Image: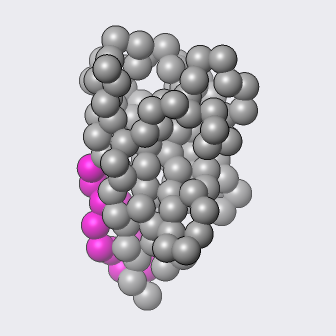
Amino acid sequence: QVQLVESGGGLVQAGGSLRLSCAASGRTFSRSTMGWFRQAPGKEREFVAGISWSGGSTYYADSVKGRFTISRDNAKNTVYLQMNGLKPEDTAVYFCARKKAAATNPRGSDAYEYWGQGTQVTVSS
């Protein structure tokens, strides 16, 4: 059974930083592409960032490129999202997810089969 547990969300002022963590259970974490998505009230879930199993490839939404950094520590079964220069429009529930092995597009939510419960990030202006 795979479980993903996010932490690190909270309330921060615009321009501030937060670091989200996602702790994963399961022996195949180190062989899986992982992703971060977010969903704001009244909006669809959107891709934020993804990272290959080795960490050698990373992917970002244009809206966060240059501000957010995804990383992973396979020894700790954990993936991180460092968020700098936060803006009010970054306010959302952030989810981590594990990609299906056979899926080819790391930016699509339907490529992911396991999801965490989410952590709230609120950025005040």
| Residue 11 included in the magenta stretch of the image | yes
Q: Please indicate, yes or no, whether residue 16 appears anywhere in the rendered image.
A: yes
On the image, the x and y values in percent for residue 56 come to 59, 23
Q: Percent from the top left, x then y, of residue 23?
A: 29, 34
Task: Please give left or right for residue 107 compared with residue 55 in the image.
Answer: right
On the question of residue 71 being in view, the answer is no
- On screen, 4 above or below 47? above
Residue 76 position (above or below residue 70): above
Residue sticking out furthest to the bottom: 125
Toward which corner of the image does residue 21 lie, by quadrant?
Answer: top left
**Magenta residues?**
7-19
Q: Residue at x 33, y 56 (%)?
A: 119
Rendered residue at 39%/35% (across/down)? 79
| Residue name at image x 52 percent, y 50 percent | 37
Image check: 19 left or right of 101? left
- The question of residue 16 being in magenta is answered with yes
Coloring applied to the structure: one colour
Q: Quadrant of residue 112?
A: top right
From what the image shows, is residue 5 above or below residue 63?
above
As rendered, which of 55 and 47 lies closer to the eye? Answer: 47
Location of residue 103 in the rendering, given as x and y in whole percent from the top left corner: 67, 24
